[in-house]
Structure formats: C-alpha cells, structure tokens
Image (tube, rainbow, N blue to C red):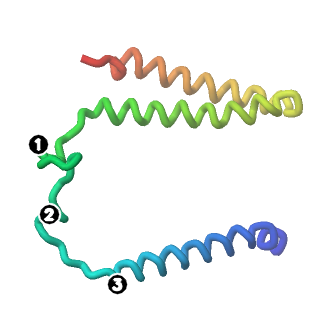
Amino acid sequence: MKLIFTEYSAILIFFAISSLLSSVIFLLSYFLIPQKPDQEKVSAYECGFNPFDDARATFDIRFYLVAILFLIFDLEISFLFPWSLVLGEISIIGFWSMIVFLVILTIGFIYEWYKGALEWE
C-alpha cells in the first residue's frame, strides 16, 4: 500500500492543488463581481442580431448517434496506435485481444449499418 501511495502522491497533490485553486478562483469571481442581470445580458446572442428563432430547438437524434460513433472510433484509434508501436514486443495474447476488440467494433458498426441508423433522409 505504501508503494502505491508513493507512486501516486504527486498526482494526488496536483489534483488537490488544482481543485483548491479552481474553487477559490470560481468563488472569488462569483462574490467579487456585481451580479446585475438585465434583459440584454440574459437574452440569446446571435452575431449581434436579435435571435431569429428559439435558441433551444431540438436536434434530431441522428446527430447524437453520429457524435457517439465518432467518439467510439476515435477511442479505437487511441487504442490502436500504442498497440501498433509495441506489437513486436507483446505476446500473442496481446495480439489476439486487440483482434477481438476490433472484431467487436466491426460487428457493432455492421449492426448499426444494417439497422439503418446511418441512413440520412
């Protein structure tokens, strides 16, 4: 247990100092600046013009689906790059575990494709 604490103590100290500093800065800015909201400050702002429509319009769910798929495949690349750098040094278990990971992602992508989730009307 002591070994783990000595290894991660710098990270814990950094986290504690950054949390404390950000909290102090937030609280100082909240209490020192006068809060006087008026109609201009709380209105929606669109490049200097009055808003044309409601700023809280709903989005189609397909935008979220595309964003989540982008994040998943972006995360896949972040796993693939270090794996490709150490491919000659890892065992056969490391190789096949990444192949299984890629097969699962491919099956999920094919499922999304056949379900029509990527079709845009």
Q: Which mark is residue 31?
A: 3
Q: Is residue 32 left or right of residue 41?
A: right
Q: What residue does disc 2 label?
A: 40
- Compared with residue 21, is residue 118 higher up or lower down, i.e. above or below? above
User: Residue 62 location in percent, x, y?
Assistant: 31, 30
The quarter holding residue 15 reads bottom right
SS class of the residue under badge 2?
helix
Inspect the image, locate mark 3, and give the three-letter code of the amino acid beneath it: Phe
Going from the N terminus, do you reach mark 2 or mark 1 first? 2
The quarter holding residue 112 reads top left
Q: Residue at x 47, y 17 (%)?
A: 110
Inspect the image, locate mark 2, and give the three-letter code of the amino acid beneath it: Glu
Q: Is residue 35 left or right of residue 29?
A: left
The residue lying toward the viewer, choosing from 23 and 117, is: 23
SS class of the residue under badge 1?
loop
Q: CA distance from mark 2 to mark 3?
A: 22 Å
Q: Residue at x 41, y 81 (%)?
A: 27
Q: Is residue 13 left or right of residue 74?
A: right
The residue at the far top in this view is 114
User: Residue 7 location in percent, x, y?
Assistant: 80, 67
Q: Which callout, 2 or 3, points to the residue nearer the camera? A: 2
Q: What residue does disc 1 label?
A: 53
The residue lying toward the viewer, choosing from 11 and 101, is: 11
- Compared with residue 32, is residue 18 higher up or lower down, i.e. above or below? above
Inspect the image, locate mark 1, and give the three-letter code of the amino acid beneath it: Asp
Do residues under tags 2 and 3 come within 8 Å of each other at their CB atoms?
Answer: no
User: Residue 105 location in percent, x, y?
Assistant: 55, 26
